Image (cartoon, helix red, strand yellow):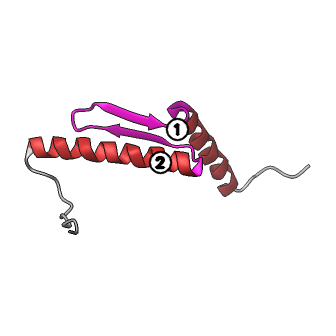
Amino acid sequence: MARQKIQIKKIDNITARQVTFSKRRRGLFKKAYELSTLCDAEIALIVFSATGKLFEYSSTSVKQVVEKRNLLSENLNRLDRPSLELPV
């Protein structure tokens, strides 16, 4: 028996929304774990609930992954900007 497709829209019932959030969050974290294990990928996953509660998963350290991302972003921005310095 195939699963029924659902329409992706905000769930009006607060209880059903919370249950769905909890189940999907666990599924998302499981997929992140599997991806990091199978592919040796560095993963940081940060989720805030509607009430502002923080949930996070990281294959190493959230701080390390975010710092690595910021460093990479800074390096890419430097490559995009033309240098005004004259070569020595």
Q: Position of residue 35 (x, y in %)?
A: 50, 50
* Residue 68 rendering spot, x and y as whole percentages: 61, 40
Amino acid type, residue under disc 2 in the picture: Glu
Question: How busy is the neighbourhood of tag 1: few (under 14 within 10 Å), some, or many (20 plus)?
Answer: some
Question: Is residue 12 positioned above or below 57 on the image?
Answer: below
Q: Quadrant of residue 53?
A: top left
Identify the amino acid type marked 1. Ser
Between 79 and 49, the residue placed more toward the observer is 49
Whole-Å distance between the Cαs marked 2 and 1? Answer: 10 Å
Q: Which residue is mark 2?
A: 34
Determine whether the residue tagged by mark 1 lies in a helix, strand or loop: loop
Q: Tell me: 53 left or right of 37.
A: left
Residue 29, horizontal then vertical, whole percent:
39, 43
Q: Please report whichever mark, 2 or 1, sits nearer to the chain's N-terminal start.
A: 2
Q: Residue furthest front?
A: 1
Q: Mark 1 = which residue?
A: 59
User: Which numbered dot is residue 14?
Assistant: none
In this rendering, the label closer to the viewer, 2 or 1: 2
Residue 42 placement: quadrant: top right
Tell me whether the residue at label 2 lies in contact with that at label 1, contact meaning CB atoms closer than 8 angstroms.
Answer: no
Q: Nearer the viewer, residue 50 or 26?
A: 26
- Stretch in magenta: 39-63
> Crowding near pointer 2: few (<14 within 10 Å), some, many (20+)?
some
Q: Residue at x 46, y 43 (%)?
A: 33
Residue drawn at 10 percent across, 41 percent down: 15
Let me know if residue 56 is in the magenta part.
Answer: yes
Q: Nearer the viewer, residue 75 or 85?
A: 75
- For this rendering, which residue is in front, 87 or 69? 69
Taking the magenta stretch, the answer to whether it contains residue 34 is: no
